[in-house]
Amino acid sequence: MSTENLIKHFADDYYEKLYYFCLKKTSDNHEAEDLAQEIAVAVIHELREGTIPDNFPAWVWQIARNRYARWADRKNKRRNTFSGGGIDDDVLKIADTEASVDDGLLLREDYNLLRRELAFISGEYRKVLIPFYIEYRKINDIAAALNLPVGTVKAKLSRARNILKEGMNMAREFGILSYKPENINFAVNGNTGELGTPFSMINRKLCKNILLAAYRTPSTADELAMEMGVALPYMEDEISNLVWGGLLRENGKKYETNFFIVSAKAKESAVMHLKSIASELTDRIIALVEHETKCYDENGYQWHEGYQPYEDMKWALLMEKADEVHSGVVKTVRESRNQKWGGRTKRADGGEWDLLGFEDFGGEAPAGVGMHGMQYKFNYKNIRDKTPNGLNPDQRAALAAVAKQNTDGIEKVLLDELVGYGYLEKAEGGYKPTFYVRFDQKVGALTAEQASIYGELYKEAHQLMLNHYNFCSGVIHGEIPDFLKNDHRIVDFACNNISNERGAVLEGALEKGYISYADNDTRKMLGAYLRL
């Protein structure tokens, strides 16, 4: 019979019998399960090592009896090392003998407490506790392995004993995040690093909730371990990684999140204020778009190529104009505090980025509108999913080359790929774009009268956005940690992300009928544009 068949035969016919054998020997369900598992591991290990017994049943039961004898011997040794009863100084007595903390030592509930505390004690003490109490190693051997004096090891064991005793007598409770994890959404500003930071560190639920817990309450590693319900060895590893990536920072013995997480309450306040100005702001943005395009046409300027109907171009024109006004607001704010843009934070793996977190917001907010290279992406109905999330530099360069009617050196396979996405279509003699393309060098100036009217409209839109920006800034300052309050880059980053004027203008323009989108709409290039 082959090894795999022997293992299957053992699993099918012997494991239940082994459990009852162990239960008879130990008189305890938990101990019987542990011992049966130990015997099963030993049997399977021997089989995988190539053992083919002549008398399989006799061989299995001999292993079972040998493992039980070892278990009983360990139990007797532990009983000699520790005294029973409650948790007192003798329970964790330190002696330079072989000793182990196991389920025969204490009352079952005491052992569970002890095992819990071993999972939540710091690495400084765990590296001497585990070898001494669990691995049967003597103090001299531990000292040699750790390159420490014997007296230092004894002192650490003594201190660890007190910590364990204190913890075992404590009514510890896992935090809410251990069974009810929350979600954080992120906005990243900048370029990722060679190791994919920050996304490589923030896409796991555990890391998100560590960051959330440390943001709400700066905590020690063991406090975070209890909040997450995760043993400290694993928690220490996660914390170390997050500190290296700059997402956590040490403040004394506590860790705190090193970036701003916008609360659901702050997001709700920003949304409510935005709704109060949305209609008026939309009117001003529409007026700016219509006044400017009308003046260009009246003046005979070739301000765009005719690849896309004007009704479709409006989607990008509205967002461009909202961004133009928003940029003017940011410039005004920075000038008021004599601030220059300070760049982004340099990271350990070569990236340069800043991060912003958002608690989940359950209320109704305007649709999100992102910017992906050369296309506004609308989280409205199914528009976003009709085109890729973004285009790489080669694809963007190919689009510019087609718009300039100079595709020398551009591979046909790349152009055909863009046709498949919908950004290009085949035309006589080559390809042409399917979206709004604007050549700024062809656009002349407005007349003085036209510019004056435009300036008044812009001033009104600018003031509305400035008021909203200042409101958002007040909300941010009301809850941002003290060590980030004077980091204007982070505050501006947060304000830019919760102000969401693009979304308000999008929904306002839809409600007013300035633009439209039906459920069965087939248009793909809404929001796409190229300025050359």
Image (spheres, rainbow, N blue to C red):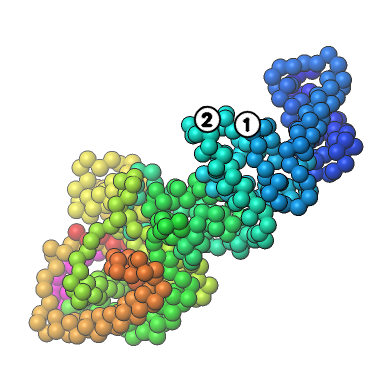
Is residue 282 shown above or below 342? below
- Does residue 300 appear left or right of residue 260 in this picture? left
Amino acid at circle 2:
Ala
Kindly identify the amino acid type of the residue bearing the numbered disc 1.
Answer: Arg
Spot occupied by residue 514 in the image (x, y as percentages of width and height): 36, 79
Residue marked by disc 2: 145
Res. 310 in view? no
Label 2 environment density (alpha carbons within 10 Å; few <14, some 14–19, many ≥20)? few
User: At 45% from the left edge and 56% from the top edge, which residue is drawn?
Assistant: 253
Dot 2: what SS? helix
Residue at the (70%, 41%) spot, across then down: 101
Whichever of labels 2 and 1 marks the residue nearer the N terminus, that label is 1
Q: Residue at x 74, y 27 (%)?
A: 42
Give above or below for 112 relative to 18: below
**Mainly helix, strand or loop, the magenta region?**
loop
433 or 115: nearer the viewer: 115
The residue where tag 1 is placed is 137
Q: Which residues are magenta?
A: 296-310
| Residues tagged 2 and 1 counted as in contact (Cβ below 8 A) | yes
Is residue 461 found left or right of 419 in the rendered image? left
**x and y, in percent, of residue 287 in the image:** 27, 82
